[in-house]
Each structure stands twice: as structure tokens, then as C-alpha cells.
Image (tube, helix red, strand yellow):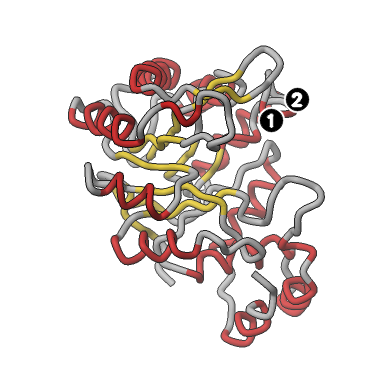
Amino acid sequence: MTDTFPLADRTVRRVGFGAMQLPGPGVMGPPRDRDEALRVLRRAVELGVDHIDTAQFYGPDVSNELIREALHPYADDLALVSKVGARRDAAGAWLPAQRPEDLRADVEANLRSLGVDHLTAVNLRRMDEGAPGAGDVPLEDQVAEMAALRDEGKIAGVGLSTVSAADLAAARAITDIVCVQNPFSLVDQKDADVLDVCAAAGIAYVPYFPLGSAFPHLPKVVDQPAVQAVAARRGVPAARVGLTWLLARADNVLLIPGTSSVAHLEENMAVADLELTDEDLAEISTVAA
């Protein structure tokens, strides 16, 4: 199992950090403990994190402001990745911001808030088709605008989020894609076709909901008896087994586990130290996908 993988114009460690949990409840407002949030970011870099995933709409504005306060000026090897395509209203609802001019404005907002001239990559987050206003903009127009931002030097690579295999193929017909963020976990492998396309093409694949959906009624990786049995045998938390399984699934998988706790961060980073045996993987494979 490799320790690093290419991402746009650099190579990063396969375990990074996701900033979504830094704001308050519902990804809205300030963190419960601002000092702890800043400590989390600084400790992440101390532990070797060189890939931080964020978005202007986390908070909104909160995650980027915390990252800048904690880490600016940034280390030369730190990859900052953001996403565009949505905004938040005062009640915390997720609103489509899918028009090319919206994407451009939000990339520039990320640059300003993070205090940088360019980002390693920015993911175009396609909204669900049922969301009001989400299906009004052709993917081709969106990708063309993202490619223009790359050609202007504002981003090093174009990424996609919440896309189908057909979407990925259509985007790749327009420009190079450096990463894809889609839901994928041991208990939700419906996106395996996209993951496999990315692996064959050398595109980084960044799973969200890596331990199962955040919704209470849907299955969780840590609740699976096979995962719990492997975790008990190896003397590690069940979550670590589920995350390590993802790293073993394909070399192009990059993890971005997030937290607002230093202790939880250190636990997450230990994922890179666990190597599952053939026996472990065979047992885990019994979990229904």
C-alpha cells in the first residue's frame, strides 16, 4: 500500500484533514471551542498532514478563517483544496450556486479568505437534481469555467464532487480532472464504478461519508460485526479498520477525516499505521455492500 498519491501539481500523503467539522453544529457558525479548533489545525500539520480540504460555505466562512489564522503563512508543501457550487442561507439551508459566474466568484472568495493566490484544486460540487435551481446549468459550462480558472492560475487542478460515471466522462472530455469526491464506504459501495475509473486514470478519489452516512437510520461501518471483530483482534477502534479498508481498496484513495478534537485527530491519523492482513480483509469482505 502506497503512502502518497498525486494531487494536481503535487504529491500528498494519503491521509489528510477535512475542515467540515470545525464550525459549529450543522456546519454553521463559530466552533464550540475556537482555541481547540486552532490547535487541531496546527497539530494536524505537526503530524504530517499536507492536504486540507475546506469550503467557503463551511460556516459559512468559518473554516477558511480558522485555517488562515492557524496556519498562514502556509508551508510550501501544504495542499489546500476547496469546493464550490453551493452557498448557505441564514437558516443553514444548502442553496445551489451552480452558474459559471457563481463558481468563479466563490473560487475568488476562497482565495481571499485563505490568503492565497491559488489553490491546489477546487471541486465542482454538483447539487442533487431535486434541489431547486440545481439542474439549470449544463455540466459542460461549469467545467469550462473551472478549466478557465485553472488556466488563469487560480487553481492548479479541477475536481468534481457528487458526480456519476457519466458526469466524470463528460467532464474529462472537456479537461483534465485531478480528483473526485463522492460518497463511498464499506457499507456503501455503489460508487465503485467511479472509483475504478479514477484508479485506472490516475485521478485521486476522496470518499465522503467514509464510515457510512451521517443520517441515523442508515448503516454505519463501525456497527458491522465483521469490522468490530477485526478491530478487537487488532486492538484498534472499529473506525480505524473502516478507514484503513478504504486505503487498501485502491492506491488512489485519499482520506480527509475531520474532527474538532485534538485527541480524535490523533486517533484518525493513526490510520496510516495500521495494515490489514489478508485474513482481516477476507473477514471484512463479508460485510454486505
Compared with 72, 105 (above or below) is: above
Name the quarter where the N terminus is drawn.
bottom left
Q: Which mark is residue 118?
A: none
Q: Residue at x 53, y 36 (%)?
A: 129
Q: Residue at x 71, y 76 (%)?
A: 234
Left or right, residue 33 beside residue 40 = right
Residue nearest the observer in this picture, 258 or 214: 214
Q: Residue at x 61, y 25 (%)?
A: 94
Image quadrant where residue 289 sits? bottom right
Residue beneath disc 1:
36
Compared with 168, 58 (above or below) is: above
Amino acid type for the residue under numbered disc 1: Glu
Residue beneath disc 2:
32
Residue 34 at what x, y percent from top left? 68, 23
How much space separates mark 2 and mark 1, taking CA atoms? 9 Å
Amino acid type for the residue under numbered disc 2: Arg
Q: How would you rate the neighbour count of disc 1 (Cα within 10 Å): few for under 14, some for 14-19, many for 20 or more?
A: some
Image quadrant where residue 226 sits? bottom right
Left or right, residue 33 beside residue 189 = right
Question: In what element is the residue under mark 2?
Answer: loop
Foreground: disc 2 or disc 1: 2
Query: Which residue lies most toward the left here?
Result: 151
